[in-house]
Image (cartoon, helix red, strand yellow):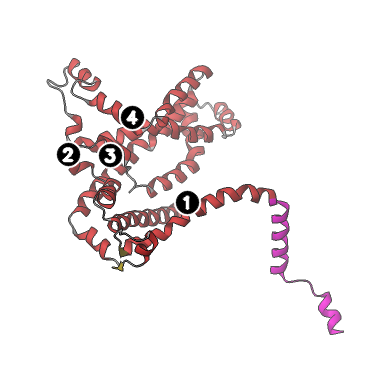
Amino acid sequence: MEAYLDKQQPPAIGGKAKARKWRKMKQQKYLYLMILPALICTIIFSYGPMFGLYMSFINYSPGGGSFFHQFFHSKFVGLEWFDYFFTNGDFYRVMRNTLAQSLLSLLIGFPAPIILAIMINEVGRGMFKRIVQTVSYLPHFVSWVIAANIIVTVLSSGGVINEILQSLHFIDKPITFLQNGHMFWWIIAFSNTWKDMGFNAIIYLAAIAGINPELYEAARVDGANRWRQMWNVTLPSLKPTIVILSILAVGNVLNAGFDQQYLLQNTTVLEYSDVIDTYTYRYGLQNGMFSYGAAVGLFKSVVAFVLVVLVNAWSKKVNQQSLY
């Protein structure tokens, strides 16, 4: 009788859920196979190199032996490199430059693609719209080597900017933009905006294309003009996209860049142009302080991770929208 009752008892709820899960995975096996190459690349190129973070806690110095022998037999120094970074006098200057350039780029560059996307969307003629969109995102595909040469030429003493300012009698003599440290932060911010504004606008244009046309029809019935439609329909519909991208942007606040600073800086503005990435390159590679460079890079990554978690939690609490 007990054996019969045991057979009649339904399987556990957890067992049912697990069976459904495996059945669903079996049905979608081809989708998982399509994901497999991306997963393998992520493991190899994103998680595999993370063992190198151990270099931040050792005094690594390349020698005559193999890399792995030198790496795992180097002296363990704990948090000594982090303490050196915080106390050697460079921390304030590097963090000031990094935060100033990143926040200015965020302040100018984040709303710019939103405004551009809305302006492109409001253009009536299809051919003109495509031309404007193509021209606007073309700088994104130009390497920073070429872009930096363009910026240097435009901002030189005999460049277009100085000629325009002198012709309008705003200045009497040319301004040495790239020799003025206080201007360097603004040059980087506007350069980043010019280069990436058009490409980032594609995301917002895609979000605008997904807005239900009936919302615009209802707004027109209510007497809303194009401005009111943009303010009451387009912008609220873009809110989820704006929130997600703003969270990601805050996570990159310490990632001020490397190419643009390295190519545009010179000895006269080094006090204002040196950011975490250029500082890490100079000490880690040029000066051979590999462990110190790794420690500075790890510090930047940890701060970025913490910022993403905090901003995501705040956005989830305030806007009910988040990355996860």
Q: Nearer the viewer, residue 249 or 114?
A: 249
Residue at x 17% of width, y 39% of height: 267
Q: What amino acid type should be assigned to the residue bearing mark 1?
A: Phe
Rendered image: mark on residue 260: none
Residue at x 66% of width, y 48% of height: 31
Say which label, 4 or 2, has the lower sequence index: 4
Residue 47 left/right relative to 259: right
Most frequent secondary structure within the magenta stretch: helix
Image coords of residue 263 (percent x, y) = 27, 36
Spatial separation of the CA atoms under disc 2 and disc 1 = 35 Å
Rendered image: mark on residue 267: 2
Q: Which residue is mark 4?
A: 147
Q: Which residue is mark 1?
A: 45
Q: What amino acid type should be assigned to the residue bearing mark 2?
A: Thr
Please identify, in this view, whether the residue under mark 3 or under mark 1 is nearer the observer. 1
Say which label, 2 or 3, has the lower sequence index: 3
Spatial separation of the CA atoms under disc 3 and disc 1 = 26 Å
Up-down: is 197 above or below 33? Answer: above
Up-down: is 35 above or below 55? Answer: above
Local crowd size for mark 4, using a 10 Å CA cut-off: few (<14), some (14–19), many (≥20): many
Q: What amino acid type should be assigned to the residue bearing mark 3?
A: Gln
Spatial separation of the CA atoms under disc 4 and disc 2 = 20 Å
The image quarter in which residue 66 lies: bottom left
Spatial separation of the CA atoms under disc 3 and disc 4 = 12 Å
Say which label, 4 or 1, has the lower sequence index: 1
Rendered image: mark on residue 261: 3
Number of numbered discs on residues: 4
Spatial separation of the CA atoms under disc 2 and disc 3 = 12 Å
Say which label, 2 or 1, has the lower sequence index: 1
